[in-house]
Amino acid sequence: MSKPNISRLALAATLSLTALMTTTTALAAPAITPFNADALVRLERVSDPRVSPDGRSIAYTLRTTDYEANKGVQSIWLHDLESGTTRKLTAGTGSSHTPRWANDGALYFLSTRSGSQQVWKLDLAAGGEAQPVTELPLDVSAFVLAPSGDRIAISVDSFPDLGADLAATKKRFDERAAQKNTGELYEKLFIRHWDTWKDGTRAQLFSYALDAQGAVTGNPAWLSAGIDGDVPSKPFGGDEEITFTPDGKSVIYGARIAGVSESWSTNFDLYRVPADGSAKAENLTADNLAMDTGPVVSPDGKLLAYCAMKRPGFEADRLAIMVRDIGKDGKVGPAREIAPKWDRSAGSLQFSPDGRKLYTAADDLGNHKLFSVEIASGKVKALTGDGHVDGFALARDSLIFAMNTLKSPNQLYKIKLSGSAPLALTDHNAATLAGLGFGDYEQFSFKGWNDDTVYGYVVKPVGYEKGKKYPIAFIIHGGPQGSMSNDFHYRWNPQTYAGAGFAAVFIDFHGSTGYGQAFTDAISGHWGDRPLEDLQKGYAAALAKYEFLDANRAVALGASYGGYMVNWIAGNWSSPWKALVNHDGVFDNRSMAYSTEELWFDEWENLGTQYEKPANYEQFNPVNHVAKWTVPMLVVQGGKDYRIPVEQGIATFTALQRRGIPSQLLHFPDENHWVLKPQNSVQWHSTVLAWIKRWTAAE
């Protein structure tokens, strides 16, 4: 055998190494797909972190998408803080969500696995399968466990005249379903709310004793007897409106008395009732005719904390942090505000273990941060920075919270109460996100109406190249008392536009939250002037600051108030836009005043009722400017939207067609004010993107 040729071996080794490096590089840098709607609807969604009593574990809800079934499916997961491991707790049919720990370490949750939504219990220490806690003839919509471990409060939709006889409510439902006549007779508002027609039921609160196995036993105690209101409130209230006192003997909950004024009243009060229903509920906040909500009780049971507004009829008033003494003698002390100079609107509250601090989250300059508030001094400290905190819980010396940004959906994080950088605990969607391209983003500011500082964001297109010009998607947020901020949105996500080759620009105009209550108040009575000035100046500021924005290829899009503003700018600021997109936007303020459901909103924003102040409704009424409309518009409307009813969208499209303006109407008969079903969401995005690309010739 001849001696090997060293040069040939070296060359072969070099070639092999080069091939290996090429392969490794290819494996390390897979092709990046621009973020899109299909990826958006399929992402796993983390929410509702809850820490176990021993501080070692976090239970949370994870929503996945069953695209073929056109729905989301929820399950409960567990993260071990000591080992760092994460595992799925619930399986099988149906959805499981709302994990809540009992003081003995058992985990209770809501699940549809039995065919209806009931409370279930999982004993993690003993192992085995989850066991039913309730097997009621009606769905359970919310529940709260007594710290004493011997009782549970539950909410179900039932007929008030039937009291605690839930079987009788089920029987009445069955009898109605069997009837051939379908007419419904109404004597007062609401006749419908959000996306549901009223059927005579109320969300009623009951409590049951729990047996040794943790299942309900005996007859229910009717805790909301005599309260003509929903507990929790509709359409979005949950168990954050209900709490037990630490000794388990009392329940405190929130309710808005309906009567004949439900559709124009924001008077939401807190009630205290014995947990066994042995006495009627006592109104704790009757002195405040605005909203009182989110009750929490200090660990020693002596202090009640909650959030309160001060102006009746205004749903976007600042939520101040209030406390009242509720000593063991049962007497309720006067309300006093904590941190009155903190010009932010507080969210859900949690006491520190020693009862000296409260933790909350609030909008703040284009982010949604976690804060600590000292009860004695009122000192407020921001605990997080950029990003959107979406639910939090205490864990020994730490806070656990879900957080997202403009480039990342929710993950769970941990920070020390003493202060530390957020530590990521979960990595859901890691493989999916690694293959997706996102646009970089930047916050900017400018002088807007009244020379106030106004903030906005710009998101670069995916694959941004310096020196290249990109079409603009100018997005106008709804509310209007809201914020389009540094968060990962599942309906209006700027990254879906960045992934389609657009640069997204959005402005937190006057009326937005997180900039002080005066800034929020500024929009009421001024829907068409002050915010418009901010949008115009913000658009100009963005063009001046970012050379990659192509002013010759710009479109404006918005939903709800943003849809109203699209209609308004169609007749008052049409010059920059090649096309418009209006989702569920107001077309005629006058008809809106008599067809929307929550009248308090429309009446506050227009500074009175339409019949008292008709000029206010006409001052910024889009219908009065249709003669000046010229820009092509896509109109999107939900058939089950009772906030801004379908006739508003139909009227907008009719006006466009009659004027001979290129236009389309995308109608979803099964969606409300939002487009929620996965396949509808993909259709929404594809239709919107096709429309704006058509008029901007985007690549």
Image (tube, rainbow, N blue to C red):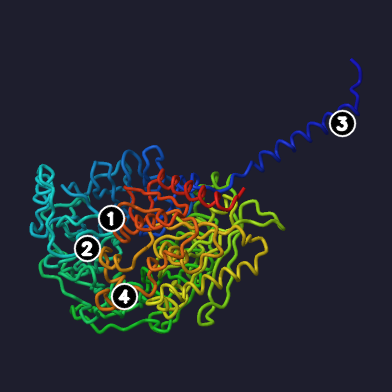
Q: In x, y percent, where is residue 32? A: 62, 44
Give the secondary structure at mark 2: loop
- Residue projecting furthest to the top: 1
Q: Going by the image, does 403 lie left or right of 150? A: right
Q: Which residue is mark 2?
A: 231
Residue 604 — which label? Answer: 4
Distance between the Cα atoms at labels 1 and 3?
A: 73 Å
The amino acid type of the residue labelled 1 equals Asp
Q: Earlier in the sequence, mark 2 or mark 1?
A: 1
| Residue sitting nearer the eye, 589 or 605 | 589
In the displayed structure, 263 sits above or below 142; it is below
Distance between the Cα atoms at labels 2 and 3?
A: 79 Å
**Crowd around label 4: few <14 · some 14–19 · many ≥20 (10 Å):** some
Distance between the Cα atoms at labels 2 and 1?
A: 18 Å
Q: In which quadrant of the rendered view does residue 155 lie?
A: bottom left
Q: From where the camera sits, is residue 411 visible? A: no
Q: Which residue is mark 1?
A: 195
Q: Going by the image, does 444 lie left or right of 128? A: right
Which of discs 1 and 3 lies nearer the camera? The answer is 1
Are discs 2 and 3 less than 8 Å apart at CB? no
In the displayed structure, 527 sits above or below 51; it is below
**Crowd around label 1: few <14 · some 14–19 · many ≥20 (10 Å):** some
Give the secondary structure at mark 4: helix
